[in-house]
Amino acid sequence: MPDPEPVHHRLTQWYRHAQRDLPWRREDCSAWGVFVSEVMLQQTPVQRVLPRWQEWMRRWPTPADCAAAGTAELLQVWDRLGYPRRALRLQQAAAAMVERHGGEVPADPDLLRALPGVGEYTAAAVACFAFGVPEVVVDTNIRRVHARVFAGDPLPGKTYTAQQRRLARDVFPDPEIDDGGLACTWNIAAMELGALVCTAASPDCARCPVAQLCAWRAAGYPEPTEQQRGRGQPWAGTDRQVRGRIMAVLRQGVPVPRSELLAQLGLPSASAEQRARCLDSLLSDGLAETDGEQVALPGSLEPAASA
């Protein structure tokens, strides 16, 4: 394994001139803006997140604004980011910030982890990127950089293993250096390298600032094993696709009869059983509501008139 210190130096120097200009990385971005970006960026590319983040922050620039918003409006602004339960969790976290922290995003990682829907990664990322707390941050891009540069593996695989967790801690810069500044820059620099250069399918080693130190390169670029490839489930025909089509219809903001909703998805291969199952799952998740035969986004149905 290469010495981490030269890797830290080269990669953080590269980041200072190669980083993308993203609004949630700017100095004037609030901690809430960073929090929203981290939730939106989970399993979602930057180019899809950027317009949604901008619109979200325009409408709800503080946790209090988000907590008070209508659920239907939240889901409409979330649009096609995928995994729309994240929008509900984001609002629940905002409400908890109002109730527990005076409407502010807490800086302490333990307090962040106690918020609804916030896991290990999001708590570490927000603490680090919003408040400069030197937490170990590991996303898919960082795992791939760690695997190639330090372990000599072509890909890290789908599962974040205990061995990979130890490696992330072992190569993490000393938090005492620069009051943790190097550690936080290391996190974002490794993430940026994985996103722009050390990609999964087409790594551009000629542009890599740490190519001369990379264990994978030194090993002759071995091919990944089937376990390392960790191919995900295809999109077409899945429940996720059907749920997405249902949400697309509901985001138009007009209640739709259940039978009409399930008939207009444009997915001839989806069985009636799958369509019904997916709608029921959206109702169970709180992403839709029903009143008799009418289905709509939460809060969009008029209360039935009493006799």
Image (cartoon, helix red, strand yellow):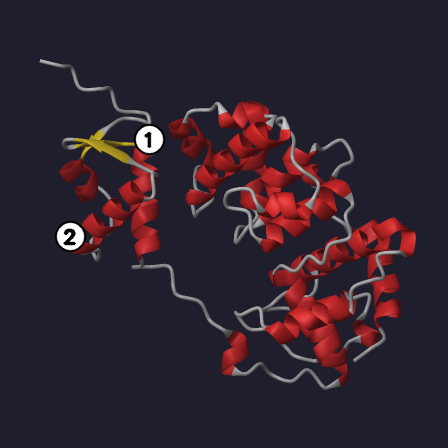
Residue 153 occupies quadrant: bottom right
**Figure quadrant of the C terminus:** top left
Type of amino acid at the residue the image marks with label 1: Pro
Classify 19 as above or below 1. above
Classify 80 as above or below 269. above
Tally of marks: 2
Residue farthest along the front direction in this orientation: 100
Label 1 SS = loop
Label 2 SS = helix
Q: Residue at x 88, y 56 (%)?
A: 176
Type of amino acid at the residue the image marks with label 2: Ala
Q: Residue at x 64, y 34 (%)?
A: 32
Q: Position of residue 119 (x, y in %)?
A: 56, 52
Q: Residue 272's mark?
A: 2
Residue farthest along the right direction in this orientation: 178
Q: Residue 298's mark?
A: 1
Classify 271 as above or below 172. above
Classify 132 as above or below 186. above
Q: What separation in Å lies between label 1 and label 2 (alpha carbons)?
A: 23 Å
**Figure quadrant of the N terminus:** bottom right
The residue lying toward the viewer, choosing from 178 and 144, is 178
Q: Residue at x 53, y 70 (%)?
A: 159
Q: Residue 175's mark?
A: none
